[in-house]
Image (cartoon, rainbow, N blue to C red):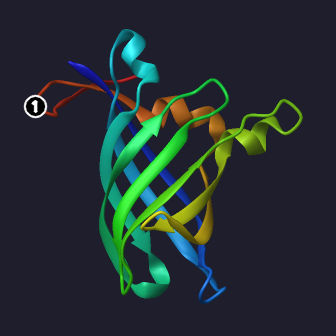
Amino acid sequence: MRVVMNETMRGWLELNETRESEPFEFTIKISLGKGPRILAPQPFAGTVRLKNRDFEGRVEGEITFQITGPKYELDFDFPGIGLVRVAGEKSYSISELKESLITCPLTVYQKGEAIGYAEVRYEDPILTFPLKAFRVESDNGTILANQ
């Protein structure tokens, strides 16, 4: 058995070249490690969507859980550009607690060079996150229970 987290984040992405904001979304599935490994980078896979480009593709990467907020690193083939990494982290703040819990600024990189920016948000009610995101699955992927 394992604990799995499913998360969908939606927002916008803007390439430096075009300076035009476009809808950007990703859904990822993370099999969480046990014990102290939970703080190590956790690999994930999922789907990325760029609505204006009518694009849906595979995304892979890592999420690292930190006390200050999770760090995301997503890799995917961007249409017309090639392999990109979209990376950033949430930065929890008491003064803006709700916004800092649901919003993540990101930078778009290609071959290590920043080529754009993005921002995504968790759009469902924050109080429902634990109920929607976490599941217990058997090793063959069968859902055993929602947490």
Nearer to the camera, 119 or 18: 18
Q: Residue 138 at x, y = what percent? A: 16, 24
Relative horizontal placement of residue 91, taking residue 58 as reference (left or right): right
Q: Which of the 4 quarters of the picture holds residue 118?
A: bottom right
Secondary structure category for the residue under label 1: loop
What residue does disc 1 label? 140
Residue 110 image point, x, y percent: 45, 70
Residue 83 location (% of width, % of height): 34, 70
The quarter in which the N terminus is drawn is: top left
**Residue at point 38% right, 10% down?**
35
For this orientation, the residue located farthest to the front is 112
> In front: 36, or 131?
36
At a point 61% along the width and 53% down the height, the residue shown is: 123
Give the quarter of the figure containing the C terminus.
Answer: top left
Specify the farthest residue to the top: 35
**Disc 1 residue type?**
Asn
Query: In the rendered view, would you say 24 is above or below 43?
Result: below
Q: Above or below — where is 9 with respect to 14?
A: above
Q: Residue 107 appears in which quarter of the rendering?
A: bottom right
Q: Position of residue 32 (x, y in %)?
A: 35, 26
**Would you place residue 38 above or below residue 23 in this image?**
above
The residue shown at (80%, 34%) is 93
